[in-house]
Image (tube, rainbow, N blue to C red):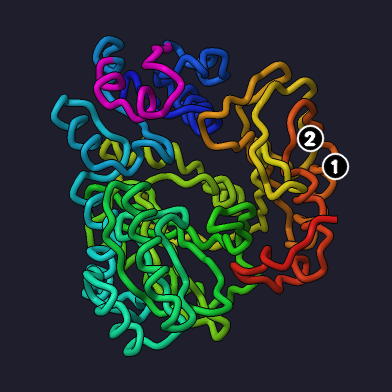
Amino acid sequence: MFKKILIANRGEIALRVIRTCREMGIKTVAVYSTADKDSLHVKFADEAVCIGKPASIDSYLNIPHIMAAAEITNADAVHPGYGFLAENAKFSQICADHGIKFIGPTPEMINKMGDKITAKETMIKAGVPVVPGGQGLLESIEQTKELAKVVGYPVILKATAGGGGKGMRVVWEESEIEKAYTTAKIEAAASFKNDGIYMEKFVEEPRHIEIQVAGDQYGNVCHLSERDCSIQRRHQKLVEESPSPFMTPELRQKMGEAAIKAASAINYESVGTIEFLVDKHRNFYFMEMNTRIQVEHCVTEEVVSFDLIKEQIKIAMGERISGKNYEPQMHAIECRINAEDPYNDFRPSPGKITVLHTPGGHGVRVDSHVYAGYVIPPYYDSMIGKLITVAQTREEAIDTMYRALSEYVIEGVKTTIPFHLQLMKNEDFRKGNFTTKFLESFKMK
């Protein structure tokens, strides 16, 4: 059993980890920037250490400061949450070098899945379906043009070190190649300090469906069913649900088996997610692996009644997983409540929350770190919290979500609540007729 865990993160995920640690009888250390001194994770942790100025590079990405905080508080483990250093192999290695357990996979596992080219080669060897495309990085515009002819338009250029849609360009015809190649490399270099890009066939009308997995130190791997993350804007997820309305029992079994193959191929240890693109014919292709807990892990927790943070900590302590593959018993939906203006191209809306009333009632869960009087800083992700509803059927979960959204009052800043309210009443969404392109034609009223 760990005696004390430092949470190298902020906001709702830091608070989420603190809650589970408290239930397990484990002391916690919060780290915070000067902008977050009044955040709830700082107030709820057993100890708190300021690690720098507001900018992430000076605080939540500052490894020396975080390690110093771990050492002065005698923390014997670090939970990285999601984002920031959660998938940083160097940070994982430094923790190991200092005798502090990184609650997540080893540096080798992170490296194998962090680089998209290496990950794709690993999946091919493991027999996991991948999107057709070239092998290796693109070295020139001429090479890119020749490969596009072989793969067939449309194609997509992707940053090998990428994520979140950065360094990614869809190309529909040869005349667009040169501009797409140049801009993708520039954006990749700026976002990841690595301008490497590669090419894949662009899957039209896709669903974004991911499988939650867990693996222990003894080679056991299981999956905990799927989440549908197709409602997204510029590759940023806004709504997630489980089970997917597009799923069939046969497809779930095939994708579950593929996800276990993928995790087993790198002897994966911890919880993680295998992400797939699924076309309209229900052919699925490996997209990437997230070697961390995800924002939308709550959806899975609600449909299989399972604490994924607790499982993650227990795996890090050397315990075995159950080895059971889980089937969803309920239907859950998550709406990300962001400080953004949906009537103004989702422009960020930092500032002070003057009034806050969170919804409640049967089948409603709110994971958030804000309160009335809290000031949302402009330096980080704009997520205020996550609203999750769970019910026996998808229709009931949507109806509960609409009711809960109607009760959610946040004043002082703009939020995505109006967007979610309109989405829950959209006929195509309610019928499950959507792809990752759904929001391109969605208009706010």
Write the residue at 26% across / 75% down. Answer: 124
Residue at screen point 64% across, 38% down = 348
Residue receiving disc 1: 406
Asked if the stretch drawn in magenta spans residue 384, the answer is: no
Image side of residue 235 versus residue 62, left or right = right
Q: What type is the residue that disc 1 sits on?
A: Ser
- Give the camera-side residue of 409 and 14: 409
* Mark 1 nearby-residue class (10 Å; few <14, some 14–19, many ≥20): some
Q: Amino acid at mark 2?
A: Pro
Q: Which residue is mark 2?
A: 359
* Residue at 27% in and 45% down: 105
Q: Residue at x 41, y 29 (%)?
A: 56
- Residue at the left extreme, as displayed: 97
Judge by depth and name the residue closer to the eye, 339 or 30: 339
Foreground mark, 1 or 2? Answer: 1
Q: Nearer the viewer, residue 108 or 442?
A: 442
Which quarter of the figure is the N terminus placed in? top left
